[in-house]
Image: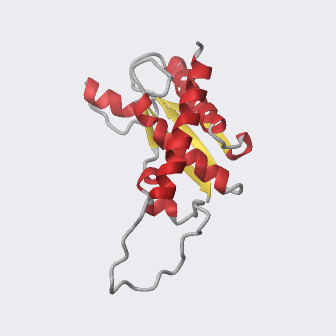
Amino acid sequence: MNTTVRVTMAALLCIGVAACAKKQEVKPQPEAAAPATEAAPTTGKYTPADLDTDACLRQRVVYFDFDKSEIKPEFQQIVACHAKYLQDRPDARMTLEGNADERGSREYNMGLGERRGNAVSSALQAAGGSASQLNVVSYGEERPTCREHNEACWSKNRRVEFVYTAK
């Protein structure tokens, strides 16, 4: 089974789990709580406020193994949450910023960052997001989050970041 089919199947499974989990979530209200300024819709759709309050949507980074562009299973849920947000908010737009660690040539790392961004884009689209909502940019090794020269640091630089340009 090729990678695209596996990613698609995993993303669809994660969407189903995320949809069920979202519907079953019950948040107790404190007795002396201030009135809410924006009530959550009863349909279970995400709102722009959820980008800052929902635990899954606040996670906006997917990390990759060395020299790989396949999404790790532990990040499928994050992709599924963001895909549902894009599906619920057709006007939302996102830039996927692909990054690599410092090892390899500049050209290779630019290509690897783009492959990683495209892998996340494909997974988001398979899970319900629209291609018109997504933009992929590769920064290669140019924007490291960690500047040390060891595996612990390099693993933080092998990533795709989700940046919402319209909510």
Q: How is the image coloured?
A: secondary structure
Q: Is residue 52 above or below residue 128?
A: below
Nearest the camera: 10 or 136? Answer: 10
Quadrant holding the C terminus: bottom right
Q: Where does residue 80 sit, x and y in percent of width and height?
A: 54, 42
Q: Is residue 54 above or below residue 9?
A: below
Residue lying furthest top: 1
Count of all numbered marks drawn on residues in the image = 0
Q: Which residue is at 52% across, 17% downward?
A: 108
Towards the viewer: 122 or 36: 36
Q: Is residue 13 visible?
A: yes
Residue at the far right: name it. Answer: 132
Q: Residue at x 36, y 71 (%)?
A: 28
Viewer-nearest residue: 46 or 113: 46
Instruction: Name the residue located 40 percent from the left edge and 85 percent from the top edge.
Output: 34
Examine the rendering and report whether any part of residue 149 can be seen.
Answer: no
Q: Residue at x 52, y 66 (%)?
A: 49
Q: Is residue 148 above or below residue 112?
A: below
What is the x, y in percent for residue 151? Answer: 27, 24
- Residue 149 x/y as whole percent: 27, 25
* Residue 25 quadrant: bottom left
Q: Please state the horizontal and vertical placement of residue 6, each as a whole percent of the image.
A: 56, 22
Q: Is residue 116 left or right of residue 53?
A: right
Q: Is residue 69 left or right of residue 4?
A: left
User: In the image, is residue 66 above or below residue 136?
Assistant: above
In the image, is 106 to the left or to the right of 152?
A: right
Quadrant location of the N terminus? top right
